[in-house]
């Protein structure tokens, strides 16, 4: 397997550090030390720390969503099972020793300005996750798929925050129980 480019290595290192320490707490010096690169090398690839954050979020988005959806698809055969599997996959994620919450929720907490590109990429990620839930709801042939997608997405977001802030990974189990009731009520 080929070694990642310096740019890719910087992004991978940044993802790890931003998850573990947050965006503001991860200084350039810490990042450079962990990545083993010079400031000159970093600034050849990124004009600013915010540009690196944006690149890290873009890369994390693709990897996380792909892995999340693959796990959901593998865990359920029917659309209804896949809707519930969202919470099983979340539960596995919450119990990972590298779970530090949602990188995008954390980004909004630190970059809340309305016109921030970091806020926008976070919004786009959440929209794409909602779209996935909505597709599953449509495939399940429920009465109001968008309504169910709103409800299940809200449950997932609440479980993520509860697992992170309260350190209760079982929030996914509770969310799944509520989700089952919502899915049952939404069936045609």
Image (cartoon, helix red, strand yellow):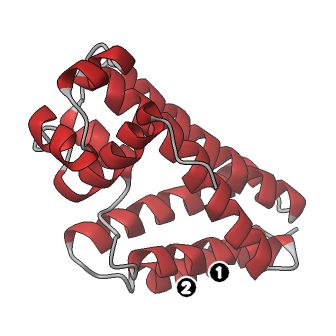
Give the residue drawn at x 22%, y 41%.
Answer: 109
Image spot of residue 76 (x, y percent) = 79, 79
Does the rendering let one see residue 135? yes
- Residue 90 - label: none
**Image position, residue 16 (x, y; %):** 32, 54
Using the rendered view, name the quadrant where residue 141 is placed. bottom right
Residue at disc 1, secondary structure: helix
Is 67 rendered above or below residue 48? below
State the image coordinates of residue 125 (x, y, percent, origin top left): 53, 40
Up/down of 152 relative to 2, above or below: below
Question: On the picture, is 183 further left or further right than 167?
Answer: right
Instruction: Indicate whether 65 appears above or below 104.
Output: below
- Camera-nearest residue between 87 and 187: 87
Residue 177's mark?
A: 2
Q: Residues within 10 Å of mark 1 (few under 14, many from 20)?
A: some
Q: Are marks 1 and 2 in contact (CB under 8 Å)?
A: yes
Q: Residue at x 70, y 71 (%)?
A: 72
Pointer 2 local density, CA inside 10 Å: few below 14, some 14–19, many at least 20: few
Q: Quadrant of the N terminus?
A: bottom right
Q: Quadrant of residue 30?
A: top left
**Residue at 67% across, 55% down:** 66
Nearest the eye: 151 or 166: 166
Q: Say left or right for 73 vs 111.
A: right
Image mark count: 2
Residue under label 1, please give it: 180
């Amino acid at each position: 397997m080929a070694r990642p480019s310096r740019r890719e290595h910087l992004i991978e290192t940044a993802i790890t550090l931003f998850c573990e320490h947050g965006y503001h707490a991860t200084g350039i010096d810490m990042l450079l030390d962990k990545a083993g690169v010079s400031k000159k090398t970093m600034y050849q690839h990124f004009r600013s720390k915010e540009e690196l954050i944006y690149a890290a979020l873009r890369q994390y988005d693709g990897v996380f969503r792909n892995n999340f959806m693959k796990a959901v698809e593998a865990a359920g055969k029917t659309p209804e099972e896949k809707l519930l599997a969202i919470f099983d996959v979340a539960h596995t994620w919450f119990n990972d020793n590298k779970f530090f919450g949602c990188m995008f929720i954390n980004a909004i907490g630190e970059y809340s300005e309305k016109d921030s590109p970091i806020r926008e990429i976070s919004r786009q990620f959440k929209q794409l996750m909602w779209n996935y839930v909505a597709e599953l709801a449509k495939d399940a042939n429920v009465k109001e798929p968008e309504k169910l997608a709103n409800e299940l997405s809200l449950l997932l977001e609440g479980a993520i925050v509860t697992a992170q802030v309260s350190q209760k990974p079982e929030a996914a189990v509770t969310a799944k129980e509520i989700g089952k009731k919502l899915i049952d009520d939404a069936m045609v």
